[in-house]
Image (cartoon, rainbow, N blue to C red):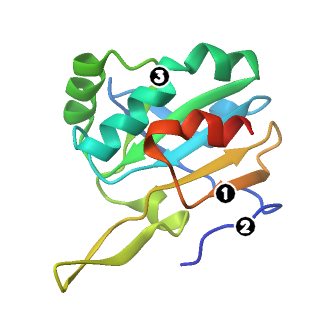
Amino acid sequence: MSIPQIGDKAPAFRGENQKGEKISLGDFSGRKLVLYFYPKDDTPGCTAQACNLSENYKQLQAQGYKVLGVSPDTAKKHQKFIEKYNLSFDLLADVDKETIQAYGVWVEKSMYGKSYMGVARTTFIIDEKGIILDVIEKVNTKEHTAQIIS
């Protein structure tokens, strides 16, 4: 499945957050959403990205954004990750990778000459009506908020 592009309607999603609460795209209707996909909780790049967004969350909120992170980790792992780094936003547990696949970010990757499937670190900026305003594929984990706001 290909990655949705700027101007496309954001693919609908439904899943559970770290508390086991149901979350869907419709819950963000009327608000701008930073929907970011990342490979794995508590790894160096993913932690840097989550902490950058959390540290700048008030600035993002002031611009009208809500933030939702998505990875294939379980709700329980997400809860530990949030508590460990005091994150300010929800994480969606996409264990079956339905949302990840709907957004086209489940891709073949390679490391040390071995191919494997994994999440391509990608951020979608979605407007109040559910339309994709921006797609950030080259994420700078330490300066991600600046990429979003610019």
Mark 2–mark 3 distance (CA, rounded to whole Å): 26 Å
- Label 1: state its secondary structure: strand
Residue at the spot of label 1: 135
Q: Is 142 displayed left or right of 138 in the figure? A: left
Q: Is 67 placed above or below 40 here?
A: above
Residue assigned mark 2: 5
Three-letter amino acid code at disc 3?
Answer: Ser
Precedes in sequence: disc 1 or disc 3: 3
What's the residue type where badge 1 is placed? Val
Q: Is residue 5 above or below residue 111?
A: above
- Answer left or right for 111 relative to 122: left
Please name the residue that numbered disc 3 is placed on: 54
Q: Quick check: 100 above or below 69?
A: below
Q: Nearer the viewer, mark 2 or mark 3?
A: 3
Residue found at x 50% / y 48%? 140
Crowd tier of the residue under label 3, counting other residues whose Cα lies within 10 Å: few below 14, some 14–19, many 20 or above: many
Picture quadrant of residue 59 = top right
| Label 3: element kind | helix
Secondary structure of the residue carrying tag 2 is loop
* Residues at marks 2 and 1 touching, judged by CB atoms closer than 8 Å: yes
- Counting from the top left corner in percent of width and height, residue 78 is at 27, 32
